[in-house]
């Protein structure tokens, strides 16, 4: 069996291995593979930006945030919030149970909760910004042209897509169909719900404003 930790120089801490095993045991193969590719692309994007592991960012935190960023789409973590927040809560619970200090857990929580937040995540600290960049590169090809030659081919060979984008979208839509509250207005899941015609009807913004203070001029 190929040792992907050695092949791709993944962090060799006990917690990194536990997180890797968790996402492969609780998530689908497509989701787990996407999560590892997210880290590989995030780390490469960081190098492209001249960010140094250990000096500019915590590589273990980046790995944990990347590998766990979609656990909110697993059955174990499916709660009543948008999937990013459910996933952040599940990751924080797992990391705290395994002895990670509160400050680093908080960074992982923020990276996961914000990973789909365009216009915000890229302004945050490197671990958060790179988790966001890695997910964008893998799902939508954003910034993929800046990846080192051959990395994407190696990553896809070791961790195949298996229809990752479609499978992840289906998981989001399925969760929203069961619980429309998971797609709040203005959120990424809310936009997915709108495009796929699932979830609760969304009122027009003008209607919300007009109904806010009836009878008040």
Image (cartoon, grey):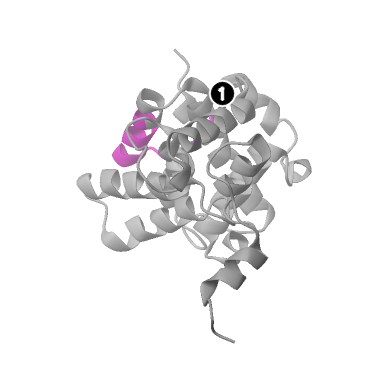
Inspect this view and state whether residue 136 appears: yes
- Assess disc 1: are there few (<14), some (14-19) or many (≥20) residues with their C-alpha within 10 Å of its C-alpha: some
> Looking at the picture, how far across and down is residue 180, in whole percent?
47, 42
Residue 12 belongs to the span the image colors magenta: yes
Read off the residue under disc 1: 159
Q: Which residues are magenta?
A: 8-22
The single residue placed furthest to the right in the displayed view is 145
| 163 horizontally vs 113: left or right | right
- By secondary structure, the bulk of the magenta-drawn segment is best described as helix
Q: Quadrant of the N terminus?
A: top left
Which residue occupies 51% across, 57% down? 128
Residue 74: quadrant of the picture: top left
- On screen, residue 56 above or below 190: below
Q: Quadrant of the C terminus?
A: bottom right
Q: How many numbered markers are drawn?
A: 1
> Looking at the picture, how far across and down is residue 204, in whole percent?
65, 59
The single residue placed furthest to the bottom in the displayed view is 217
Inspect this view and state whether residue 7 appears: no
Which residue occupies 51% across, 47% down? 183
| 212 horizontally vs 191: left or right | left
Which residue occupies 67% across, 33% down? 151
> Looking at the picture, how far across and down is residue 172, in whole percent?
52, 35
Residue 92 belongs to the span the image colors magenta: no
Instruction: Name the secondary structure under disc 1.
Output: loop
The answer to which of 43 and 21 lies nearer the viewer is 21
The answer to which of 139 and 147 lies nearer the viewer is 139
């Amino acid at each position: 069996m190929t040792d992907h930790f050695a092949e791709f120089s993944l962090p060799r801490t006990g917690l990194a291995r536990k997180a890797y095993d968790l996402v492969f045991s609780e998530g689908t193969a497509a989701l787990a593979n996407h999560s590892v590719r997210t880290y590989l692309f995030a780390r490469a994007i960081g190098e492209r930006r001249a960010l140094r592991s250990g000096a500019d960012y915590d590589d273990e935190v980046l790995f944990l945030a990347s590998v766990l960023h979609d656990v909110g789409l697993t059955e174990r973590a499916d709660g009543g919030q948008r999937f990013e927040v459910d996933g952040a809560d599940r990751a924080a619970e797992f990391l705290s149970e395994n002895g990670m200090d509160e400050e680093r857990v908080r960074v992982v929580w923020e990276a996961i909760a914000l990973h789909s937040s365009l216009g915000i995540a890229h302004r945050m600290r490197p671990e958060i910004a790179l988790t966001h960049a890695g997910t964008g590169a893998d799902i939508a090809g954003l910034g993929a042209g800046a990846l080192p030659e051959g990395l994407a081919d190696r990553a896809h060979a070791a961790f195949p897509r298996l229809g990752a984008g479609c499978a992840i979208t289906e998981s989001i839509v399925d969760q929203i169909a069961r619980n429309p509250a998971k797609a709040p207005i203005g959120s990424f899941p809310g936009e997915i719900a709108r495009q796929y015609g699932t979830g609760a009807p969304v009122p027009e913004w003008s209607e919300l404003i007009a109904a806010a203070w009836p009878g008040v001029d």
